[in-house]
Amino acid sequence: MKPESIAVQDIAALRPVCLRRTIPQEYLDLNNHMNMRWYVALFDDAGDTLHDQIGLTREFRRASGTGTMDLEHHTWFLNEVLAGSQVSVYARIVARSAKMIHYLMFMINESTGKVAAHFECVNALVDLAARKTTPYPVEILARIDALLAEQNRLSWKPPVSGAMRV
């Protein structure tokens, strides 16, 4: 099922840009476009910026003995990405619980001016010693809530699959 279309300029209003990259030849598959594994890798790399934005920095995670783990995700491949294309990734939080965030990421192919892919994810904070999900600290929840409130003021609804929730 194809997600609802969102204008590139609306997606680009999400700040900060989580990742910007030029696609190397090595990312191509036998169809001569970016292989699906690289979309997930790029969205994963972009997640570090989102985590930093809400306070889940490497330093915080190291000091608290926590990490983050994807519990579920879905990728919509909308338009091909070829070698040499400049892509950017933006994030929008959809919802949160005490232990998880539900968010979307959007990959824009800046070389073509088209949305290349959407990525939907449920991610959790994990106590690495216990190997179990753990509640976010109050200060992290406050940052998530502030970003969620800011993004809920956007003129467009997040195009979620309906299959995931926190």
Image (tube, rainbow, N blue to C red):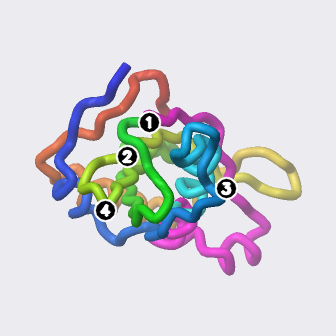
**Residue 144, position in %: x, y?**
42, 59
Decide if residue 18 is on the left or right side of residue 59.
left
Residue lying farthest to the left in this orientation: 155
Q: Are marks 2 and 1 in contact (CB under 8 Å)?
A: yes
Residue denoted by label 4: 110
- For the residues labelled 2 and 1, the Cα–Cα distance comes to 6 Å
Q: Secondary structure at mark 1?
A: strand
Q: Secondary structure at mark 4?
A: loop
- For the residues labelled 1 and 3, the Cα–Cα distance comes to 25 Å
**Residue 23, position in %: x, y?**
52, 63
Packing grade of label 4 (10 A; few <14, some 14-19, many >=20) is: some
Decide if residue 69 is on the left or right side of residue 1.
right
Camera-nearest residue between 92 and 29: 29
Camera-nearest residue between 106 and 128: 106
- For the residues labelled 3 and 2, the Cα–Cα distance comes to 26 Å
Packing grade of label 3 (10 A; few <14, some 14-19, many >=20) is: some
Q: Amino acid at mark 4?
A: Glu
Residue denoted by label 2: 116
Q: Are marks 3 and 2 in contact (CB under 8 Å)?
A: no
Q: Identify which residue is drawn at 63% across, 44% down.
A: 29
Which mark is first along the chain, 3 or 1?
A: 3
**Residue 17, position in %: x, y?**
37, 69
- For the residues labelled 4 and 3, the Cα–Cα distance comes to 29 Å
Which mark is first along the chain, 2 or 3?
A: 3
Q: Quadrant of the N terminus?
A: top left
Residue denoted by label 1: 77
